[in-house]
C-alpha cells in the first residue's frame, strides 16, 4: 500500500490549534523576541515613533522614517505587538494584534528592525500557543489568570528545557542552508531534525558534542568569507516569506483521509490544494479533524454571552445562574432535548438590556457581540407607477451591511426593491419570494443598524418546554397515591398559589363561586380527602375550604416542597417541565383562584390579580405550554396589579377546559401542536460589565432556553471545535513500533483567543503555513487545515475598510483573490533544500463558510478558481444526517489522471470500480426524476437494480460514522473491497436479467439474495483493528458467495 506515515497535519482555525504538527488557526507572531524587550531607554531615539491616530486595530504612527513593510513594532507603553502594513512619508499604518483600548495620541511606537517572524525549533510539539505564538500555559503560570495580559512578552519556545542533541556533522565539513547538522528526540513519536537556516552557509569550525543543551546554547559555529556565525537549535523565519526549496515537483501520491467518499471519488494528493465549502452545520470541522487524526501525513497543522445572574434552564427543568454553569452541564434546547456545555466564554464588554416591547418584562442582559435569534416577517408589496410605466416589487432579504465606524461587515435583513417594465414579470418575481418569516441571527450591537420598518417586523421567540418530567407523579406515588391524581393535586395547588391570602404555614383555599367550590370538592374526592367548607356572610360570599387528616399532610407538604421559596408563595419552576396535563391543571387552578378576575373573548383571555406569585409565575407557565402571553404591571395603586393576557389557541383552550366552568376537551394535551411564540423587543445599551456564556457542540443548533423560555444563541461557536480538540486529542493514540503513543506528542495547538481582535486572524494563516513549511523541509508530508479561510477573509475586509480602500464584491478588498492565491501557492511537493536529499510536501485543505451555503460568495468563488479539489458540502445531506455530507454531484478532483499510476500499482481494479460507481450514482439521479413522474414500476428491471444498488452505495459506502470504532477510519484496502463487492453484485444482477431475457426479474433476484444484500450493507462494520488479512478474507468470502449464488440463479 505504499509508504505508511504517522499523521502530522496543520489546521488553521478561528480558534486555531496545531497538532504537533497540527496547527489550528495560528496567529503567527513570534519575532526575534530576544531583541524586543519593549519600550526601553537604551534604544536609539530614531527607533521610536509616536501614535498619530487610533481606529480599532489600525494605528497610524508618525516619525517612522526608516520603517519597512511588515516590520514588527511594539505599540504604546504596554508594548502591544503590531506590524507595519502601509508607509506614507514619515507616517506608518500599523496593524495591532492585541486590544488597542487605552492607546492615545503621542504614545511611543518602537520599531524592531525585523519582520514578523516565528520561532522554529524543538518544543513546538505538545504545546499550545495563542494567535501570535505566545505559549498559553506559560502565560497562565505567570499571570495566574485565564486571560492573557496585554503586551506580555513570553518566549514562544522554552529556552530553559534541555534537549538531547546528537550531531550529524563534524568540524571541517562544508554546510549550506537546509542541511541537517543534528537531531533531537522530542518525544517517542517525533525525531526533530535540526537544520541550518536556508540563508546560511560556510565551513564548520565548531560542532557541539552529543549531550544536553538548551535553545540558548550555541551548538554550531560556521565561517564563510572570514565571517563567523553561531547557531542554536532554533531559528526564526519571517511568516510572509516562503521558505526556499531546490525544486517544486509533481505530486503523485494520494492524501489518504480515511473517508471513503473522499479517497474513492474525489482524491487529493500529498502536496495538493483542496477547498471544503459548506454552510454551518455541514461538517467542515469534522472532516478537518478526521484528516488530522487519520490522514497519511507526517504532520498536521490545525490552524455571545450574558450578564451575571442570568438564569438558564437546565436539561432537568431546574434553573441555574449562567456564571455557575460548568463544562459538562446540560442545558435544554428548544426541541426539549439536552445540549452539553463544552466551553465557557468569559469577558468584559458593553452590555445590552433586552426587554419585551409589549410587556413589562426584561428578558435578559447580554454583551454587545451576543447573537440574538430573530425572525422577520416577510412583507411583499407590488406597486405600479403609471407615469414611469414600471411595476416595483418591495420585499425583505438578507444582505450585507457595513458598520461605518469599524468597517465591519455583517448579515442583516434589509428592504429591497425590484422594478420591471412587464407586470407579469413582476408578479412572477413576487410569487417566487418565500412568504415564510426570515430566520437569522444578529449581534446586539448591530440592532441599531436595522431600518425601522424591518425593526418593526422583527421579533424573538419564547419556546414551549417540550420536555415532560414526572416530579408531581413521582411525589404522589411515593406518598401512597395513584399517579393519575397528580393533576388534581396540581389544580388545588394552583388555586392556593393564586389566592393572595394564602401563606406557607397553613393550607386552605378560598373560592368566590359555587362552581369552583364544586370542582375543588371533585378533586378532593379524587385524592380521597375530606374538606370543610365555611361560607362567609359578607358581601364577597367567600367560601373557605380547609383539608383535614391525611389530606392536610399531603397538600401542605406539596405546597411546602414545590410552591414555597424562602417562605414566599411562588409558581414552582419545576412545573415548566412537568407533564402537559399537570401544567394545564395548575394554570387552570390559578385562573379559578379567588384573586383572579378573568375576562374571556374569542381572541384572548385576560386575568388580573394582585398576587405577584400568580402574576409573574403564570407567564412562564403559560409560555411553557406554547401560549403567547403578555404581562403588564399597574404600579399606580397601593398594591401592584398584574394583568396577564393569553392569546387564544389550542394550548389555551385545553387549559380552559380544565377550569371549573370549562367544557371537557376531547383532545389530549400531548397531541396539541406547541410552537414558539413571538415577542417584539426593545434594546437599551448599558455600561461595560463582565459577561458569561456557554458553548454547545457543533452538531447542535447552538440554541438553548433561558429561564424565561427566551431562545438564546450560544457563544463562541468556533470555540467548541477547540474544546473538542483539547478533549479528544489527549485520548487518541497511534501505533508506533508496536506500542500505542498519544497523538498529542506530535501535536501543536495554536489558538486565537476570543479577546484578540479580528485582525489577528490575518497573520495567523501565515504562521500556520510557515510552520508547515518548516516541517516539510525536514522531509515530512504536512497537511494544513485552514478552518476557515472565510474568517481570514473577513479580517482582510475589516482592515481594508479601516484603510478606506475601494471595496470590491461584498465589501472584500479587490486583492482578495491575489492574497488567496499567494497562500495556496505555498502548498506542493518539493525537493527540499540541503542534505541529505529528501522530498516533503504541504497539502492545504481550506474550509470555507459561505453565508447560507451560497457558493457564489466571493471567498468561495475565488478559492474554487485556485484549488484543484472541491469537496462541496450539502446542507440537505447534513439535515438528513448523511455524513460526510459531500455532494457527489457537485464535487470534483483534478488529480485523477496524476494518481492513476499509483492506483495501477496498488489496486489495478480501482479506477474501473470508481468509474462504475460514479456512473451508477449519475444514473440513479436521472432515474429518480423519472420515478417521480411515472413511478418505479414503469422502469426496466436493470433500472430497478440501479436504483437499489445506488441506495446501498449511498447509505453504506458514501455515508460514514465518524464516531464509531469500526468506521471512523476506513483504510484504502477496505474502501476498495467495499466497492469491489457492491459493483460486483450490481454487475452480476444486471447480467442475470439480460441473459435470461427478463425472465429473471429484480424482485426474484432480491428475494433470493437477501442475505447477500445484508452482507453488502454490513461490510462497513468490519473493524480494521482485526487486521488487514482477516478483514480481506471475510470480504473475499462474500465475493465468492455472490459469484456462486448468481451462478446458481442463472443455471
Image (cartoon, helix red, strand yellow):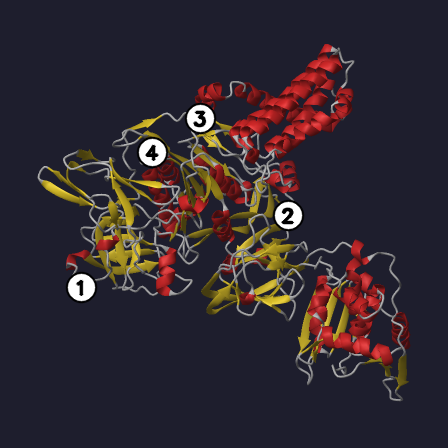
Q: Find residue 331 and report its image quarter.
A: bottom right
Q: Residues within 10 Å of mark 1 (few under 14, many from 20)?
A: few
Residue 2: give its label: 3
The residue that disc 4 covers is: 779
Tell which circle, 4 or 3, labels the residue nearer the N-terminal end: 3
Secondary structure under badge 2? loop
Tell which circle, 1 or 3, labels the residue nearer the N-terminal end: 3
Marks 1/3 in contact by CB < 8 Å: the verdict is no
Q: CA distance from mark 2 to mark 1?
A: 67 Å
Marks 4/3 in contact by CB < 8 Å: the verdict is no
Does 869 sit above or below residue 754? above
Secondary structure under badge 4? loop
Going by the image, does 281 lie left or right of 563?
left
Tell which circle, 3 or 2, labels the residue nearer the N-terminal end: 3
Q: Residues within 10 Å of mark 3 (few under 14, many from 20)?
A: few
Secondary structure under badge 1? loop
Q: Nearer the viewer, mark 2 or mark 1?
A: 1
Q: CA distance from mark 3 to mark 2?
A: 61 Å
Q: Nearer the viewer, mark 2 or mark 4?
A: 4
Marks 1/4 in contact by CB < 8 Å: the verdict is no
Q: Find residue 923 and report its image quarter.
A: top right
Secondary structure under badge 3? loop
Q: Find residue 819 and report its horizontal and vertical position in percent.
A: 36, 39
The residue that disc 1 covers is: 41
Q: Residues within 10 Å of mark 4 (few under 14, many from 20)?
A: many
Residue 487: give its label: none
Q: Find residue 737 and report its horizontal and vertical position in percent.
A: 43, 37
Q: CA distance from mark 1 to mark 3?
A: 60 Å
Q: CA distance from mark 1 to mark 4?
A: 45 Å
Tell which circle, 1 or 4, labels the residue nearer the N-terminal end: 1
Amino acid at each position: 500500500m505504499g509508504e505508511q506515515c504517522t499523521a502530522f497535519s496543520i489546521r488553521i482555525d478561528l480558534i486555531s490549534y496545531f497538532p504537533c504538527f497540527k496547527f489550528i488557526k495560528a496567529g503567527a507572531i513570534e519575532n526575534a523576541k530576544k531583541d524586543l524587550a519593549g519600550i526601553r531607554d537604551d534604544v536609539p531615539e530614531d527607533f521610536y515613533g509616536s501614535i498619530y491616530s487610533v481606529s480599532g486595530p489600525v494605528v497610524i504612527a508618525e516619525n517612522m522614517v526608516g520603517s519597512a513593510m511588515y516590520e514588527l513594532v511594539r505599540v504604546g507603553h504596554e508594548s502591544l505587538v503590531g506590524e507595519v502594513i502601509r508607509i506614507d512619508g514619515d507616517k506608518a499604518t500599523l496593524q495591532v494584534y492585541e486590544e488597542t483600548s487605552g492607546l492615545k495620541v503621542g504614545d511611543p511606537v518602537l520599531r524592531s528592525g525585523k519582520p514578523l517572524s516565528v520561532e522554529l525549533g524543538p518544543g513546538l510539539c505538545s504545546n499550545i500557543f495563542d494567535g501570535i505564538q505566545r505559549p498559553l500555559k506559560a502565560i497562565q503560570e505567570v499571570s495566574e489568570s485565564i486571560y492573557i495580559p496585554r503586551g506580555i512578552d513570553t518566549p514562544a519556545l522554552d529556552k530553559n528545557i534541555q534537549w538531547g542533541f546528537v550531531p550529524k556533522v563534524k568540524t571541517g565539513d562544508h554546510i549550506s542552508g537546509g542541511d541537517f547538522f543534528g537531531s533531537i528526540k522530542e518525544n517517542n513519536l517525533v525525531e526533530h531534525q535540526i537544520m541550518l537556516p536556508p540563508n546560511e552557509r560556510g565551513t564548520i569550525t565548531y560542532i557541539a558534542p552529543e549531550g544536553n543543551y538548551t535553545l540558548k546554547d550555541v551548538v554550531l559555529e560556521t565561517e564563510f568569507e572570514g565571517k563567523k556565525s553561531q547557531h542554536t537549535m532554533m531559528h526564526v523565519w519571517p511568516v510572509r516569506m516562503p521558505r526556499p526549496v531546490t525544486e517544486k515537483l509533481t505530486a503523485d501520491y494520494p492524501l489518504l483521509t480515511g473517508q471513503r467518499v473522499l479517497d474513492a471519488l474525489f482524491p487529493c494528493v500529498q502536496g495538493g490544494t483542496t477547498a471544503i465549502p459548506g454552510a454551518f452545520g455541514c461538517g467542515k470541522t469534522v472532516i478537518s479533524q478526521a484528516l488530522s487524526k487519520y490522514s497519511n501525513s507526517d504532520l498536521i497543522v490545525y490552524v455571545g454571552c450574558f450578564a451575571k445572574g442570568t438564569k438558564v434552564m437546565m436539561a432537568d427543568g431546574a434553573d441555574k445562574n449562567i456564571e455557575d454553569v460548568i463544562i459538562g452541564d446540560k442545558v435544554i434546547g428548544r426541541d426539549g432535548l439536552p445540549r452539553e456545555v463544552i466551553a465557557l466564554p468569559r469577558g468584559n464588554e458593553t452590555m445590552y438590556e433586552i426587554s419585551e416591547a409589549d410587556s413589562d418584562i426584561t428578558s435578559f442582559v447580554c454583551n454587545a457581540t451576543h447573537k440574538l435569534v430573530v425572525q422577520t416577517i416577510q412583507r411583499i408589496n407590488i406597486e405600479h407607477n403609471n407615469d414611469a410605466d414600471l411595476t416595483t416589487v418591495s420585499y425583505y432579504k438578507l444582505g450585507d451591511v457595513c458598520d461605518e465606524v469599524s468597517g465591519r461587515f455583517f448579515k442583516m435583513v434589509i428592504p429591497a426593491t425590484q422594478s420591471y417594465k412587464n407586470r407579469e414579470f413582476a408578479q412572477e418575481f413576487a410569487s417566487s419570494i418565500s412568504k415564510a418569516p426570515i430566520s437569522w441571527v444578529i449581534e446586539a450591537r448591530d440592532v441599531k443598524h436595522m431600518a425601522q420598518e424591518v425593526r418593526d417586523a422583527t421579533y424573538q421567540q419564547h419556546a414551549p418546554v417540550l420536555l415532560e418530567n414526572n416530579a408531581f407523579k413521582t411525589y404522589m406515588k411515593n406518598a401512597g397515591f395513584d399517579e393519575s391524581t397528580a393533576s388534581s393535586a396540581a389544580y388545588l395547588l394552583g388555586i392556593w398559589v393564586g389566592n393572595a391570602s394564602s401563606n406557607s404555614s397553613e393550607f386552605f383555599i378560598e373560592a368566590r363561586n359555587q362552581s369552583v367550590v364544586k370542582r375543588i370538592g371533585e378533586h378532593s374526592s379524587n385524592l380521597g380527602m375530606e374538606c370543610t367548607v365555611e361560607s362567609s356572610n359578607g358581601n364577597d360570599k367567600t367560601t373557605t375550604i380547609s383539608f383535614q387528616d391525611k389530606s392536610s399532610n399531603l397538600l401542605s407538604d406539596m405546597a411546602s416542597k414545590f410552591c414555597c421559596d424562602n417562605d414566599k408563595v411562588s409558581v414552582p419552576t419545576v412545573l415548566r417541565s412537568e407533564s402537559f396535563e399537570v401544567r394545564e391543571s395548575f394554570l387552570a387552578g390559578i385562573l379559578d383562584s379567588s384573586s383572579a378576575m378573568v375576562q374571556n373573548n374569542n381572541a384572548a383571555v385576560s386575568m388580573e390579580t394582585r398576587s405577584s406569585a400568580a402574576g409573574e409565575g403564570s407567564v412562564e407557565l403559560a409560555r411553557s405550554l406554547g401560549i403567547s402571553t403578555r404581562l403588564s404591571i399597574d404600579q399606580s395603586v397601593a398594591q401592584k396589579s398584574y394583568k396577564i393576557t393569553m392569546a387564544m389557541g389550542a394550548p389555551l383552550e385545553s387549559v380552559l377546559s380544565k377550569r371549573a366552568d370549562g367544557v371537557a376537551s376531547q383532545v389530549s394535551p400531548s397531541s396539541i401542536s406547541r410552537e414558539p411564540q413571538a415577542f417584539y423587543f426593545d434594546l437599551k445599551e448599558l455600561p461595560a460589565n463582565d459577561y458569561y456564556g456557554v458553548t454547545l457542540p457543533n452538531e447542535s443548533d447552538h440554541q438553548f432556553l433561558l429561564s424565561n423560555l427566551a431562545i438564546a444563541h450560544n457563544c463562541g461557536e468556533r470555540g467548541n471545535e477547540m474544546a473538542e480538540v483539547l478533549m479528544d486529542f489527549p485520548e487518541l493514540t497511534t501505533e508506533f513500533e508496536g506500542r500505542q503513543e498519544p497523538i498529542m506528542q506530535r501535536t501543536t495547538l495554536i489558538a486565537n483567543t476570543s479577546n484578540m481582535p479580528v485582525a489577528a486572524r490575518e497573520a495567523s494563516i501565515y504562521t500556520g503555513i510557515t510552520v508547515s513549511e518548516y516541517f516539510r523541509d525536514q522531509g515530512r508530508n504536512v497537511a494544513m487545515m485552514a478552518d476557515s479561510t472565510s474568517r481570514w477573509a473577513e479580517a482582510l475586509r475589516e482592515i481594508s475598510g479601516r484603510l478606506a480602500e475601494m471595496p470590491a464584491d461584498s465589501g472584500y478588498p479587490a486583492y482578495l483573490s491575489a492574497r488567496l492565491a499567494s497562500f495556496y501557492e505555498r502548498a506542493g511537493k518539493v525537493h527540499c533544500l540541503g542534505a541529505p536529499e529528501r522530498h516533503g510536501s504541504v497539502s492545504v485543505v481550506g474550509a470555507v463558510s459561505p453565508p447560507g451555503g451560497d457558493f457564489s460568495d466571493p471567498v468561495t468563488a475565488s478559492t474554487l478558481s485556485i484549488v484543484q479539489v472541491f469537496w462541496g458540502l450539502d446542507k440537505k445531506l447534513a439535515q438528513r444526517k448523511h455524513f460526510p455530507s459531500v455532494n457527489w454531484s457537485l464535487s470534483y478532483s483534478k488529480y485523477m489522471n496524476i494518481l492513476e499510476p499509483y492506483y495501477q500499482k496498488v489496486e489495478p481494479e480501482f479506477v474501473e470500480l470508481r468509474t462504475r460507481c460514479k456512473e451508477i450514482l449519475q444514473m440513479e439521479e436521472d432515474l429518480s426524476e423519472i420515478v417521480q413522474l411515472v413511478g418505479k414500476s414503469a422502469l426496466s428491471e436493470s433500472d430497478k437494480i440501479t436504483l437499489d444498488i445506488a441506495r446501498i452505495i449511498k447509505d453504506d459506502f458514501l455515508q460514514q460514522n465518524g464516531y464509531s470504532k469500526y468506521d471512523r477510519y476506513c483504510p484504502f484496502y477496505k474502501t476498495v473491497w467495499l466497492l469491489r463487492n457492491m459493483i460486483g453484485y450490481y454487475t452480476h444482477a444486471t447480467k442475470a436479467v439480460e441473459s435470461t431475457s427478463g425472465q429473471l426479474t429484480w424482485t426474484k433476484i432480491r428475494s433470493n439474495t437477501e442475505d447477500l444484500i445484508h452482507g453488502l450493507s454490513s461490510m462497513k462494520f468490519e473493524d480494521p483493528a482485526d487486521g488487514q488479512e482477516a478483514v480481506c478474507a471475510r470480504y473475499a468470502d462474500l465475493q465468492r458467495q455472490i459469484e456462486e449464488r448468481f451462478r446458481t440463479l442463472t443455471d
